[in-house]
Image (cartoon, rainbow, N blue to C red):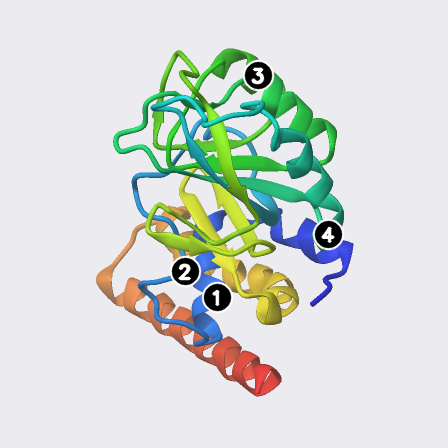
Amino acid sequence: MGLKPDTLAKLAKFDTPTICNVIELFDVRPRSSGFMDGRIRAGFPELPPMVGFACTAAFRSGSPPLGGDAYGSFLEQVRQYESLPGPAVMVFQDLDDPPVGATFGEVMCSVYQGFGSTGLITSGGGRDLLQVRALDYPVFTGTTICAHAYCHILHLGLPVRVGGLVVQQGDLLHGDANGVTSIPLDIAADAADVAQEFCDAEKIVIGYVRGPGPKSVEGLAEVRTEFTEALAKLYRRVRRSFA
């Protein structure tokens, strides 16, 4: 399913927890699924949200490849960008347990970004962190490792499991300082359109507790009721539209 370019731009305006909250409105999956667990953390949490489509690969570095160029699949990864519906997010499953060498470094991230990738996720480690940070290229990793060891890519475009989440080639991903979630393609445009309304509903409570003047439990109860009613109204409208 194709998405309008402005859909990705809209999604990028909101943090990942907000996107997760909005996805819950559609009741398309259990609330305990669809996102990566705490093993995957933002390398540069100060960067804005990352949005793009998964370009998947399996990785290993604990032993030499059986033959050929260890980076032989590197060019093919970039070629796969053409088949994606939008900008690529590189997603690596490191098959070594624990990870031995770094999945990425300055050169790889520079190439990926140069061809339009908006970020990288790996269940393994990364290196050249200062240089990659200078690129403003978001990375999400399980650890940091200074050497690349016998790094090589085993397969491309197949499902991978990273941070407990199975990621398919072309899945829409959103990540920031809080972690990474997938966004079902059939609700992505609607989710982008209602995210601001969800934030506005939250401001009902936030505005009260952060505002001037004395606070009371009774006052909090009133704004909480207003907040709950606003969310219920949004939920009903979303469900009617999605149905």
Query: Between marks 1 and 3, how big is the CA–CA gap?
Result: 34 Å
Asked if residue 149 can be seen in this view, the reply is yes
Counting from the top left corner in percent of width and height, residue 220 is at 30, 63
Query: Between marks 2 and 1, how big is the CA–CA gap?
Result: 10 Å
Sequence-earlier tag: 1 or 3: 1
Counting from the top left corner in percent of width and height, residue 52 is at 62, 47
What amino acid is at disc 2? Gly
* Disc 3 + disc 2, Cβ < 8 Å: no
What amino acid is at disc 1? Ile
Q: Which residue is mark 4?
A: 83
Q: Which mark is residue 34?
A: 2
Q: Nearer the viewer, mark 3 or mark 2?
A: 3
Query: Between marks 4 and 1, how big is the CA–CA gap?
Result: 26 Å
Asked if residue 136 can be seen in this view, the reply is no
Counting from the top left corner in percent of width and height, residue 80 is at 69, 44
Residue 126 vertical placement versus 138 (above, below): above
* Disc 2 + disc 1, Cβ < 8 Å: yes
Q: Which residue is mark 3?
A: 106
Query: Between marks 3 and 4, how big is the CA–CA gap?
Result: 25 Å
Q: Nearer the viewer, mark 3 or mark 4?
A: 4
**Residue closest to the eye, 167 or 149:** 149
